[in-house]
Image (tube, rainbow, N blue to C red):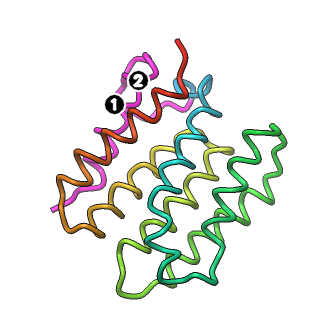
Amino acid sequence: MIRPAAMLYDVRKAVSEVLDKPFTERMDHQVFRPYQKELALWAADCAERVLPYFEDLHPDDDRPRKAILECREWVRTGVFHMAVIRRVSLSAHAAAKEVKGNDAACFAAHAAGQAVGTAHVNTHALGSSIYAIRAVIAYTGDIDEGLVKEREWQLERLRTYVKH
């Protein structure tokens, strides 16, 4: 059984280590603030990696892809429009809720919605990571594939963005 709260704890702890920041029992947005753009790029990568699970089933629905693109645009330009971020995030989550009978596609769309939310709240990147892990597990049917291999890939990817 997969427990999202336990996954969040583990991902938060691992991300804190990669960022060389102290880990606390409660979520502290200030700890991750200096790395908000790096976390956004990482979240976009996590979501984009599992996006085919959604797009293969719904090739005409570009809402999750638009969320990822908007996340990358915010990082590139630094221009933040809450109305745009909110709209594309909620649209990606709506796409996820419309998926019937395919958890991998649903989680992939949620990962995109969380990724763009990182522009507003940096810890949404953690949600993108967890949804991507859950998407891999749902797609492969292999917990180790998601919890171990996907998490390792994600943390290695985050390290490429973080310069100490």
Q: Establish if 4 lies above or below 32.
A: below
| Residue positioned most to the top | 164
Q: Which amino acid does label 2 sit on?
A: Val
Q: Which residue is drawn at 36% across and 64% down?
A: 135
Magenta span covers which residues?
1-29
Q: Do the residues labelled 2 and 1 touch (CB within 8 Å)?
A: yes
Find disc 1 in the rendering and name its residue. 14
Q: In the image, residue 35 lies at what x, y percent?
A: 59, 27
| Residue positioned most to the bottom | 100
In the image, is 27 to the left or to the right of 10? right
Q: What residue type is labelled 1?
A: Ala
Image quadrant in which you'd find residue 83: bottom right
Find disc 2 in the rendering and name its residue. 18
Q: Residue at x 64, y 68 (%)?
A: 90
Q: Residues within 10 Å of mark 1 (few under 14, many from 20)?
A: some
Q: Which residue is drawn at 27% across and 54% down?
A: 146
Q: Does the magenta stretch include residue 113?
A: no
In the image, is 69 to the left or to the right of 123? right
Q: Establish if 93 lies above or below 49.
A: below
Q: Is mark 1 on a helix, strand or loop?
A: helix
Q: How crowded is mark 2: few (under 14 residues within 10 Å), some or many (20 or more)?
A: some
Q: Quadrant of the N terminus?
A: bottom left
Q: Does the magenta stretch include residue 6?
A: yes
